[in-house]
Image (cartoon, grey):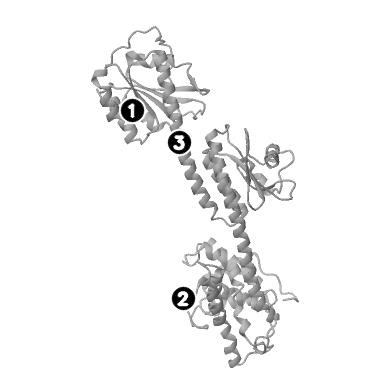
Amino acid sequence: MTDPIAADDDWLLDDDEETSSPTGQTPIDQRLWRVLIVDDDVDVHAVTRLALRNVSFKGRELELFSAYSAAEAFRILRDTSDIALVLLDVVMETDDAGLLLARQIREELNNHIVRVVLRTGQPGQAPEQRVIIEYDINDYKAKTELTTQKLFTTVISALRAYESLMMLERSRIGLGKILAGATNLYQVHSLREFASGVLNQVSAILDVGADGVLCVMSTGESEPTVVAATGGYSGLSDREHLPNDHPLLPTITKAFHEKHSQFEHPANVLFIHTQGERELAISVTPPWPLAQIQRDLLEVFCQRIAAAFDNLYMFGQLRKAQEATVVALADLAEFRDHGTGGHVRRVQHLSSRIAESMTRRGSVDPELTPQLVEMIGLASILHDVGKVSTPDQILLKPGIHTPEERSVMQTHAEVGRAILERASQMVDGVSYLTYGAQIAGAHHEHFDGAGYPKGLAGRDIPLAARIVAVVDVFDALLHKRPYKEPWPYPEVVTYIRERSGSQFDPEVVEALLAVIEHNPPAPAGDDD
């Protein structure tokens, strides 16, 4: 049992003072500082509440919680977020219950930010020097010395220290999110994916759900282009520009005009200028005004976004150059083989759709990676690049090839593989050229081992080549060649079905049939 509090003119009792419910599930009010009073004496709670009833710090009032034992206090601290200060009695259910709770707060709850002030009515039972050294507490007061003014000073000092620690912790967490977010942004391949990633990361840094819009303004443009939108603004994703009457437009326009960020709650616009002479505006509308630390973190993140945006643009240009090179190689091969028409483009389109279909159908083929799905279309364009080595009299012969001519014709597979394999070795990692070499060298192999040039069978044939093997024959049969007229569509489908498991991978055939079932290819025209 604790000693009664010494009489003091500044301490008043009010038995009718209502105590708050520590277990209430009301939403966190960001305007209030949360303070937990831990004491087994009801009068101490009443007096403390009365003394602190008008206290505020930086415009935020106090929200007081009460616990009448160390065990109850532990549960409140475990289940309630953002408690800034614990006013803790030492002697409760045991002589050292408060001291043990102080240790639990730091070690079991791993909470090193909440400020702990010990209040004791028996100072000799817990000597101040020993307690300060052995326990991670922030202040030690005898109840007899805590007048209203001294309690006010103690509480304000603790809240100020808590606020400083929280700012440091939020900076640490925010910077961690910035680093993680910047890493993720470098992994995207399109501007819209990039923009969506930016909005997600901004929401994470704010640590609130936020509606957001990202707009881009390029040099010479008169109005911003909407690139991505989230939350309540997601409907804007389908529009090229913000509507003239949209509430965010004035603030976004002002940011572009003044060339710096605008924080006009509820509209907050981050302005970003890239080295590529593009300007970005990210507008977010969190439920309350942004604190200065949040603004500072967002400004740091904006610097990372600018660098990531420039790198994304450079990556896109390099990607386009790579694609242009692949198309040029394919065009070179197709230029000599006039009868193939748009064959390679159709193979490109259908190969991509088959890989996507296999993914949707839950294929367990280990080679069916997101990288293959992304690259197989463009890589398939190179399947006949080796034909550049085939003599015209054989390549362009309108009739059936002799065995000798067929043997020469078949060398195009090895030639194409060798050319592309050498080129792929000049690029780190897996590229279009990697898959192109696999396809060029093995798209004439048969699933049962009866194909050429190496007689590979089953999954010894690369998946990319197994896919293109089906697509190449399917498209070739549908369209005119120097040595044949186009086949009727039903006959082509029957031919492919009949060779499932012998010439073709059955899983690829099923994926092809699933693709063409709902979207059959257009009939062959005169230009094919």
Q: CA distance from mark 1 to mark 3?
A: 19 Å
- First in sequence: mark 3 or mark 2? 3
Q: CA distance from mark 3 to mark 2?
A: 57 Å
Q: In the image shown, does 322 or 464 lie closer to the viewer?
A: 322
Residue under the image location 67 percent in, 42 percent down: 259
What is the crowding at mark 1: few (fewer than 14 residues within 10 Å), some, or many (at least 20)? many
Q: CA distance from mark 2 to mark 1?
A: 68 Å
Q: In the picture shown, does residue 451 fall above or below 229?
A: below
Q: Residue furthest front?
A: 275
Q: In the image shown, does 250 or 279 lie closer to the viewer?
A: 279
Where is mark 2, residue-wise? 460
Q: Report x, y in % for residue 32.
A: 49, 25
Amino acid at the residue labelled 3: Leu
Verify CB contact (< 8 Å) between mark 2 and mark 1: no
- First in sequence: mark 2 or mark 1? 1
Quadrant in which the N terminus is drawn: top left
Q: Report x, y in % for residue 235.
A: 66, 45
Residue under the image location 68 percent in, 88 percent down: 397
Q: Report x, y in % for residue 366.
A: 46, 66
- Would you say 70 lies left or right of 370 here? left
Tag 1 secondary structure: loop
Verify CB contact (< 8 Å) between mark 3 and mark 2: no
Q: In the image shown, does 129 or 463 lie closer to the viewer?
A: 129
**Can I make out residue 202 in this image?**
yes
Amino acid at the residue labelled 1: Ile
Residue under the image location 67 percent in, 87 percent down: 392
Where is mark 3, residue-wise? 168
Tag 3 secondary structure: helix
What is the crowding at mark 3: few (fewer than 14 residues within 10 Å), some, or many (at least 20)? few
Where is mark 1, residue-wise? 137
